[in-house]
Amino acid sequence: MSSLIQKQGLTSEELQMLNSEMMKKHKSTGITWLLWFFTGGVGGHRFYLGRTGTAVAMLLTLGGLGIWSFIDLFLINSMVKETNEKIENDIIAEIRLLKNAKKNSAAAL
């Protein structure tokens, strides 16, 4: 589901909470590129993006002897975008969970 559609049901307070959490948790494209440049052969950029499994594989193979690192040159921007979308969707799910918990506790009283 698109994050825009998910955002439509949020109040302005919940949108502020979403923006605040995104500021804390989002992944920077610039930092990812710097990590790729300096630690690409050992998967530093993938560790940063939370892709631990493939990062460990890169670490053990030295970036597929450089081939994998080269391929990531073309994938980094989409990996950052995908990671940030996942983070945003997770935050929205948490906000909805809190909202439902508040409703349920109010109804129980």
Image: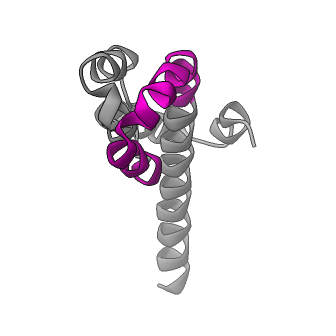
Looking at the image, which residue is at 38% across and 32% down? 26
Q: Is residue 97 above or below residue 15?
A: below
Q: Is residue 99 above or below residue 14?
A: below
Q: Is residue 96 above or below residue 58?
A: below
Q: What number of labels is visible?
A: 0
Location of residue 37 in the rendering, given as x and y in whole percent from the top left corner: 31, 16
The stretch of residues the image draws in magenta is: 52-81
Question: Which of the 4 image quarters holds residue 29?
Answer: top left
Looking at the image, which residue is at 35% across and 23% down? 32
| Frontmost residue, 37 versus 1 | 37
| Frontmost residue, 57 versus 5 | 57
Location of residue 64 in the rendering, given as x and y in whole percent from the top left corner: 46, 36
Q: Is residue 99 left or right of residue 1?
A: left
Location of residue 33 in the rendering, given as x and y in whole percent from the top left corner: 36, 16
Which quadrant: the N terminus? top right
Q: For the stretch drawn in magenta, what is the main secondary structure?
A: helix
Looking at the image, which residue is at 48% across and 42% down? 87
Q: Is residue 97 left or right of residue 39?
A: right
Extreme-left residue of the structure: 38
Looking at the image, which residue is at 58% across and 24% down? 78
Q: Is residue 25 above or below residue 72?
A: below
Query: Residue 47 colored magenta?
Result: no
Q: Is residue 66 left or right of residue 6?
A: left
